[in-house]
Image (cartoon, rainbow, N blue to C red):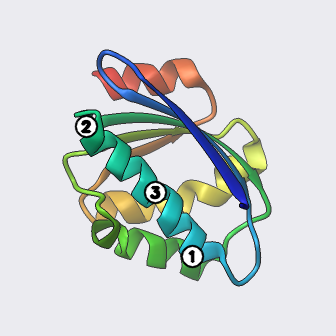
Amino acid sequence: MPYTLSFSVQPEYLEVDMSVQVEEGLELREAFERWKEVAALCREHDRTRVLVTMVFEGEYSLELKFRLAKGASAIGWSPDLKLAVVIADPQQFERQLFTETAMVSLGYEMKLFTKKKPAKKWLLQ
């Protein structure tokens, strides 16, 4: 599997660690699969706030990022979910900024961070 996902349930939010190895030709399917899993975990554990720490190997095209954002509702993502994503690598962080812009413009509450502490603070406010 080109990604790993682990989680813990915190009193006010769900904390997810995700490691992603981008595989050409499978990018969209696997992105939908892992975010669908996160949405299902939110419902299963009755959480609407999610703190995700991501590590990437590889990159996604701009078109794929847009298709992922447009398809978020089809995989169970809903506007009531608040998502803070921590990407420590500066290059990967920059590469994912379009995803944040697309999600926010579609009515989702999402923000990218390079450090966990400000991400958690934003998530819980």
Which quadrant of the figure contains the N terminus?
bottom right
Q: Secondary structure at mark 2?
A: loop
Work out whether mark 3 precedes mark 2 in sequence or the reverse, and give the earlier one.
3
Q: Quadrant of residue 9?
A: top left
Picture quadrant of residue 84: top left
Q: Position of residue 120 (x, y in %)?
A: 44, 22
Give amino acid for label 2.
Answer: Thr
Q: Amino acid at mark 1?
A: Leu
First in sequence: mark 2 vs mark 1: 1
Q: Secondary structure at mark 1?
A: helix
The residue to which callout 2 is attached is: 48
* Residue assigned mark 1: 28
Give the x, y percent position of residue 52. Answer: 52, 38
Q: Specify the label residue 2 is tagged with.
A: none
Q: Are marks 3 and 1 in contact (CB under 8 Å)?
A: no
Image disc number at residue 35? 3
**Would residue 112 be visible to someone looking at this image?**
yes
**Would you say the residues marked 3 and 2 are in contact, meaning their CB atoms lie under 8 Å apart?**
no
Q: Quadrant of residue 108?
A: bottom left
Q: Secondary structure at mark 3?
A: helix
Taking the image as shown, residue 45 lies to the left or right of residue 19, namely left
